Every structure is written in C-alpha cells, then in structure tokens.
Image (cartoon, rainbow, N blue to C red):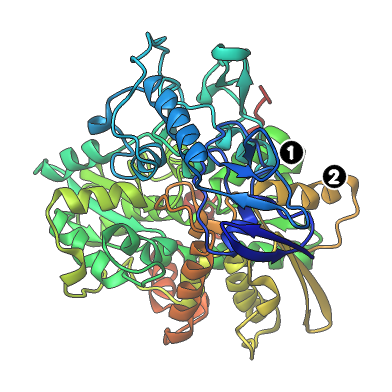
Amino acid sequence: MVTLNIDNKQVTVPEGTTILQAAKEANINIPHLCYFEGLKSYSGCRVCVVEIEGEPRLATSCSRKVAEGMKVNTHSARVRRARRTILEILLANHPQDCFNCERNQNCDLLRLAFECGVKKLRFEESEKRVLPIDNTSPSIIRDPNKCIACGRCVRVCHDIQTVNAIGFINKGPDTMVATSMDRGMGNVACANCGQCILVCPVGAIKERSAVDAVWAAIADPAKHVVVQEAPSIRVSLGEELGLPAGTLVAKKMYAALRRLGFDAVFDTNFTADLTILEEGSELVERVKEGGVLPQITSCCPGWVKFMEHYYPELAPNVSSAKSPQQMFGAVCKTYYAEKAGIDPKTIVNVSVMPCTAKKFECQRPEMNDSGFKDVDYVLTTRELARMIKEAGLDFVSLDEEPAEDLLGLYTGAATIFGATGGVMEAAIRSAYMLITGRELENLDIEPVRGLEGVKTATLNVDGLELKVAVAHGLGNARALLEEIKEGTSPYHFIEIMACPGGCVGGGGQPIRFDSSLKKKRGEALYEEDRNMPKRCSHHNPSIAKIYADYLEKPLGKRSHKLLHTEYTSRPVV
C-alpha cells in the first residue's frame, strides 16, 4: 500500500494506483476528458493535470502513478489556469453549434468548461477545416468536425471490442479519428455496437435517428403503426425521464407509447419467449442428433456482424433463429395482420431497442420473410425519450397500462434477455424441460449471472453434463471463439452479447458515465423475473396459442421460414 497527500488529505491506496483513481477513492474530483473508466489511460487532453510538490511540470493524473509521501494539489491556481487554457483551446477549435448538437445539455466539454470557470474564449475561433460527415452506416453517424481527439472511441473499439473499425490518422494538428482509408463506418468491419457513442464526450458520434420518420408514420392515417420494446428498455428509459437508475417502467412505457399515437403497443419480450422455444429446440436437436456444437446464440446483431467479418467459418455454430426483434417483425406482418384483419401493407413496425446495431439488422435484405420489410424503423432508448419529451408527456405521473395481449404477454425468462447471461438462463429453463420432460426445480442459474467477462457452468441434465459459457463484450468473446476454431471448446451452448453488460449496456442506452448503471439495470430485470407469475418461456400461453393457431411447432415448416435466417461472410476492411 502507498500513502500520499492529496489536497491536504491523507490517502492510502494500492501500489500502481494512478493519482486520478486515488483522488476518486478520497472523493476528490479531478476534471478529465480523455480518461474513461475501463479504458487504458491516454493522457491526450491534459485536462486532468495536477501539481506535485517538488516537480517543475504539471502531471497528468490519469497516467501518473502514486508514490509514497507524494504531495498533490489538484486545484491550485496554476492547475486551474492550465485547465482553463486547455479547455479554451479545445472550444476555439470546436463547432459553435451547441443549440443543434445531439449532446446539447449532456456534453462533457461544455460541462467541464463551466465547472472550470471558462467564461469567455481568450483565443479567436480558429479557421476550421470543414470535413465531410460520415453517414455511410445505417446505424452510426460520425461528425469529424466535432471530434476533440480524446481517443475514447478508438480505445473502446480497439481494446474492449477488438473490432478496430476506427483509429487515429495523420500527425500533429492534423491528427484525427477515421476509418481505414477513410472508407466510412458503413464500409468497414464495424459491428454497429455503438459503444463509441457511449464513450464520446461530445457529439462527434451519434445514432442515425429514425424519430422524424416515426412521427411521420404516426401522423399518416393510412398507416397502422405498431411498436415493440426490448427487455432492457423497461429498466433504462426512466433514467432519461426523471426516475432513478434501474427503475422498472414497463407499464408507464406502454402508456406513453399510446399517448404518442401508436395504434398497437406490444412487447419484444413476447418474441424473446418465442426465440427460446426455437433456439432451445435447435439446441436439443443438435445435442441429440449430433449437430454442430457448440451452438452460439444469435439474438445480438452486433455479435452476428462481428462473426461475419472475423469468424465466418463459425457460422454453422450460430443458431439460425432470428433475434426477437426480427421474429416480432415477421409474426406482426403475418399472424397479427391475419388476426386483426389488417392489410400488412399498411403496417409500420417500429421497435425500441437499446442497440444501434438493430438499425443495421432491420435493413438486412434477408429480413423480409413476411413478404415485406419485417421491421421498418428502430428507435434507441434515447430516441424514444426524446419523442416523449417532444410530446410534452409527464412520464413520471403517467398511470400504468398493460400491453396488448396477443403479442404482449411474456414470462420472466424473456425479461432477463436484457442482462448478460439472461438468454442462456432462459434457454436452460426451457431446454431442461425439452430434454427431460420435467420442469427445472431451481430456475435461478446463478453461475451465468453477473458482470464477469466470461462465465461458465455445467448442468446435469439426465446424465448429460451440459457445459455452457457466456461472454459479453466482443473482446471477451474472442477467447471462446478461438477455442472453437482450435477444436478445443468443451461447451455445448454459448451466449455472446456484443456490448459489455449485455443489452443493459447497449450503444443506444442513456449516456451516463457511471459504471454501476449496468448492474442496477440488470438487477431490476432479475427482480421483475422473480415477481413474474410465469418464469419459463414454454409457460407463456400466448406462445402456445401462436404455435397452435399459426406456427404449428418449433422448427416446423412455417416457423422455420418466418423465424430463422442465414448469415453472410463479410470482408475485413
């Protein structure tokens, strides 16, 4: 342990701790921009400089390690002047379009400028290069003119996700973030996960918005506009609308969607249950008949696209089941249209997702098995919150309402899809019954829960030692995928989610720089699961009904046509 003095406060921390981390332990806030918890220190912006007694130069606290007896001043007059100067230079080189910016009222640069006492710019606004905006991706838009070269997006893409879709190019004042050969995000091996959006401190990266298109559809009397919401939305939407993190708002959300003008309010949880019956049946078939193992989940479009770029040879391992979003789109424009007596040509299917990769997924050319584009528009959690605010709704005071029964009933197994390990746990609950004909006694599969990067478990299923693994974050997934490539994987079933924490940490979720949020959101999903009257997907009466009335059986002819898909090998560029 090392003891040092920070702002006349004695602090004892482990050896190897940085000054910034030590100050945080002592509840001392050191302003910072390029530093982000969980990413390697970069020391690029120098906003976090501090004064160390006996040293002539200011030190960057995000990279400088503590030393025994060190005396640090984090807010001396010299430090405050340096920070203001750094921020003034950044602002002088930054577009002055705050009113129109995506991150208006949620911008780290402006917040720090205010907190550090920047009241006016002493430097004249520089003559800026006007660089083209990268709008090649269906999911993500990059505005290099707003980039402050903090490197957060590069590090999360390279170090956490191991995708390497973006990086630094050029040197000196011309240094900037770009894709390989400046091809654009839509033309490189980007997984569309949106983690770059979550870590960007300014508005340089954002989702491609569907808000205006959805408003237009709602206003069109010739359209029948339906909406579905992913499991994790119910525990994250409230954060944008005045409620504490992790508050369960499913029924308020349904009420708000009706006030916005949607003609039918359903829930993606319904097709999460449907996914379990299809994917679980596929696993049982592979285990019993000697199919390709391990089977890997296919719910996450970010992971699927990553596989298509980097591990296309493993496509046979990936479940052919579509994601719950796309299953919903297919049954909405067939089964629901038939039951409701609505021409599917008039149906506009909108989904609310925690995920920017879903915007890419809904545009995949193979996602039209209903005879139409299965899902028309995808909104992120942030976009739905924006619509609720635009409509002037007081979300907190809304009365709770249910979703429509036909495609809105769900079980606890469906709701935990939003947390890492949730798909695996839901699948085990039903796969056990499908294999043994008996119900699993303990439905809480604790070994696959939590935020450890890779989790494993072995379950005895009538003498079969079923080995499973769960990975969240694409960097963590690589270890499991390399085992499969090498032929050494011991697993029968693997769940992969592209985003750290699973969907609760998706790239479309509220932008909050708090590492505890994923845990709070996940805990809220497990709490809803515990309180649900039915906790296994095969107990959902609406799922039994759709099979009896329309799909016939899992992996049947019609269900395979509507609910399953194929994958595409993509180049790495």
Residue 566 appears in the picture as rendered: no
Label 2: state its secondary structure.
Answer: helix
Give the residue type at disc 2: Lys
Give the Cα separation between the discs numbered 1 and 2: 9 Å
In the figure, 369 relative to 523: above or below?
above
In the rendered image, the quadrant that contains the N terminus is bottom right
Q: Quadrant of residue 209?
A: top left
Q: Which of 341/483 is in front?
A: 483
Residue 134 appears in the picture as rendered: yes
* Among the two numbered marks 1 and 2 on one chain, the one whose residue lies closer to the N terminus: 1
Determine crowd level at label 2: few under 14, some 14-19, many 20+ residues with C-alpha closer than 10 A. Answer: few
Residue shown at the point (50%, 33%) measured from the top left: 82
Question: Dots 1 and 2: beta carbons under 8 Å?
Answer: yes
Label 1: state its secondary structure.
Answer: loop
Kindly give the residue lying farthest to the bottom in the view shown. Answer: 441
Residue 151 in picture, x, y percent from top left: 58, 32
Residue 243 in picture, x, y percent from top left: 30, 67
In the rendered image, the quadrant that contains the C terminus is top right
Find disc 2 in the rendering and name its residue: 485
In the figure, 553 relative to 108: above or below?
below
Residue 498 in picture, x, y percent from top left: 60, 49
Find disc 1 in the rendering and name its residue: 311
Kindly give the residue lying farthest to the left in the view shown. Answer: 221
Residue 481 in picture, x, y percent from top left: 78, 48
